[in-house]
Image: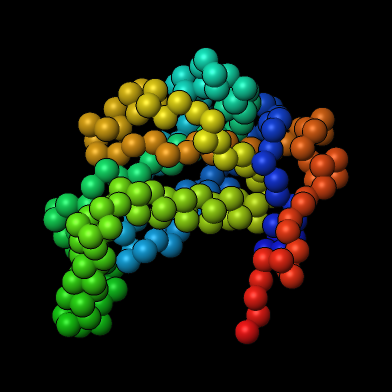
């Protein structure tokens, strides 16, 4: 599916068919879309909890109790659910780990470029930590870049998705021990296949976007 067609086809799916499962072949692609997302300075400050089983989805649904119960079915009936998590810090050990992985992947043609990349990444992190004092928020922004990339990516595979901020992130932090591991939950995204009765499909609820004239200035 081409990009424009995918953008017009996709929507926030409200009703998933519990009998339709993403194939193993497509699940491999789903994981690669997550892994290959861009991030500022290639920081990759994320971790993904993927519910790939009924038991996993039940654990994920613990974040939909109480006020967020309206999202429970979107988790239990989906094929898979991805919990997008952000790092809580980017310490020296993590920065060195990134550099080592990049080096092993052949990213640097020479030592000078390697050190320039390392210095630049640490400089930006220092600006956000000490000057802007928003390092965690900056890392969360990178996770949201991944979410946007992911929604479009799975749409090109013909896979439906529903991003959900209406989930108890603290409960999921506790369920998966995320804070002790240096992460915190940000957003959950259910993926799978829509039902014919879903009220939010684009044929029943046409897409609405502000016009090009209102949202763009062409110089």
Quadrant for the N terminus, please: bottom right
Question: Residue 196: where, in percent of width, then height?
Answer: 82, 34
Please give left or right for residue 92 compared with residue 214 in the image. left
**Residue 19 appears anywhere in the view:** yes
Residue at 70% across, 45% down: 11
Quadrant for the C terminus, please: bottom right
Q: How is the image coloured?
A: rainbow
The image shows residue 81, relative to residue 207, as above or below, that is above
Residue at 31% across, 59% down: 43
In the orientation shown, which residue stands out farthest toward the top?
Answer: 66
Please give left or right for residue 168 compared with residue 151 in the image. left
Closer to the camera, 205 or 94?
205
Occupied quadrant, residue 23: top right
**Residue 157 appears anywhere in the view:** no
Residue at 57% across, 40% down: 163
Closer to the camera, 14 or 80?
14
In the orientation shown, which residue stands out farthest toward the right?
Answer: 203
The image shows residue 38, relative to residue 13, as above or below, that is below
The image shows residue 173, relative to residue 58, as above or below, that is below
Question: Residue 26: where, in percent of width, then height?
Answer: 58, 48
Question: Residue 212: where, in percent of width, then height?
Answer: 73, 68
In the orientation shown, which residue stands out farthest toward the left?
Answer: 92
Please give left or right for residue 195 compared with residue 121 in the image. right
Occupied quadrant, residue 97: bottom left
Please give left or right for residue 56 compared with residue 107 in the image. right
* Count of all numbered marks drawn on residues in the image: 0
Residue at 53% across, 56% down: 149
Question: Residue 182: where, in percent of width, then height?
Answer: 24, 39
């Amino acid at each position: 599916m081409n990009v424009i067609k995918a953008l017009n086809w996709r929507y926030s799916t409200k009703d998933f068919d519990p009998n339709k499962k993403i194939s193993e072949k497509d699940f491999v692609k789903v994981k690669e879309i997550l892994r290959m997302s861009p991030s500022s300075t290639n920081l990759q400050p994320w971790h993904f909890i993927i519910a790939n089983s009924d038991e996993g989805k039940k654990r994920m649904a613990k974040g939909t109790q109480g006020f967020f119960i309206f999202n429970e079915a979107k988790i239990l009936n989906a094929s898979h659910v991805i919990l997008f998590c952000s790092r809580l810090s980017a310490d020296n050990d993590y920065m060195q780990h990134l550099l080592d992985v990049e080096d092993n992947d052949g990213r640097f043609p020479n030592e000078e470029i390697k050190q320039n990349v390392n210095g630049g990444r640490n400089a930006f992190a220092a600006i956000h930590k000490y000057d802007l004092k928003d390092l965690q928020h900056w890392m969360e922004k990178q996770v949201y870049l991944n979410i946007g990339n992911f929604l479009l990516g799975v749409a090109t595979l013909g896979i439906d998705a529903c991003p959900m901020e209406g989930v108890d992130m603290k409960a999921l932090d506790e369920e998966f021990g995320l804070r002790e591991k240096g992460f915190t939950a940000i957003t959950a995204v259910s993926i799978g296949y829509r039902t014919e009765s879903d009220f939010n499909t684009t044929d029943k609820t046409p897409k609405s976007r502000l016009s090009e004239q209102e949202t763009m200035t062409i110089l």
